[in-house]
Amino acid sequence: MKSFVKSTRNHLFCYGAGEERVGVPTEYTSYQNNLFNETRMSRRSQRKRITAHASFMAVKKQLMKKHIVIFTGAGISAESGLKTFRGEDGLWEGFRVEDVATPAAWAKDPELVQHFYNVRRKTVLEAKPNAAHSALVKLEEMYQVNIVTQNIDDLHERAGSTKVLHLHGLITKAQSSEDPKLVYPIVGTEIGMGDQCELGSQLRPHVVWFGEAVPAMGEAIRICQTADIFIVIGSSLQVYPAAGLLDETPNGAVKYFIDPQASALIRHHDVIGIDEQAGVAVPRIVDQLMGNNVQ
């Protein structure tokens, strides 16, 4: 049997492999155990420090990313086949806005209003994100990106954008007629007359109508105030208070305005106007931002 000899300052002892350590001083065994535990704790602490450092670096990297705020209007959705809010004749899908998009219209003829939005909802769900929607998603690889939209469709979300704020609501959801904070997903494409919220009131489209407050406006302002780059896409900047968001951006922010009529609509000297459709201009601008990471 092979034996092992160990010595300490005051002891000489031996033991065989697999045998109980007869004659091993208690203080030596205790020393070994303490050394083992200290080594194990040291390794755990080291792993924790490495993990904490990695988390810190990830947060630091995120904070160092430039902040891009995208403000979109009806023009970007029009290229997916969704008609703009108002046509040249002042009508929306053949209806006067006052008859289908105001609290007074809902009070006067809820069936008409409900039908109008049910038809619009079906059209939205049949539409597909276009090249501009898809290009904006790529920016999230290099930038902090927030999209603030006047549109009530969900094309940004379906394209893959992760931070989308809808100023005027989302047509694919319903809300209580009594308490607008009670919001529900819609199963299918329609809200039926008689469909009620938990308070017993009729469900209506989750859309901000003319004459109603814009609950998300405060959050939108805070987002725009920290923009390094601000891009307006497909908005005429005529509908307030949303149109005032451009004025909330920092003075040093780089600002783009993409719309076929951009040059005619620009009222700010520090805005870069691009007179093109979103599907043409947005992918090009995104490629430039991804390649050059504007300083």
Image: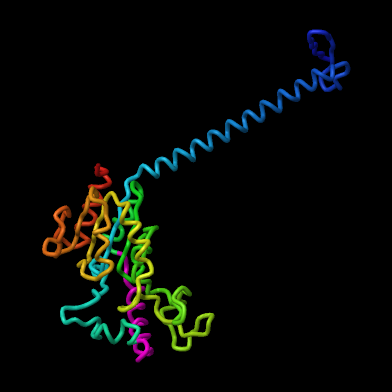
Residue at image point 38% right, 63% down: 157
- Identify whether 45 is placed above or below 114: above
Check residue 114 for magenta coloring: yes
Q: Can residue 184 be seen in this view?
A: no
Viewport quadrant of the C terminus: top left
Residue 31 point in image, percent of width and height: 76, 20
Q: In this view, does 130 lie to the left or right of 50?
A: left
Residue 170 point in image, percent of width and height: 38, 71
How is the model colour-coded?
rainbow
Viewport quadrant of the N terminus: top right
Q: How many labels does the image show?
A: 0
> Seen from this angle, which residue lies furthest bottom?
108
Tell me where residue 40 sits by quadrant.
top right
Depth check, front residue: 27 or 3? 27
Depth check, front residue: 280 or 60? 60
> Seen from this angle, which residue lies furthest right?
22
Residue 263 point in image, percent of width and height: 12, 61
Q: Is residue 175 left or right of residue 246?
A: right
Q: What stretch is highlighted in magenta?
A: 106-129
Residue at image point 29% right, 87% down: 99
Residue 287 point in image, percent of width and height: 24, 49
- Identify whether 62 is placed above or below 133: above
Check residue 288 for magenta coloring: no
Residue at image point 84% right, 17% down: 24
Q: Is residue 125 left or right of residue 270?
A: right
Q: What type of secondary structure mainly makes up the magenta span?
A: helix
Q: Is residue 259 visible?
A: yes
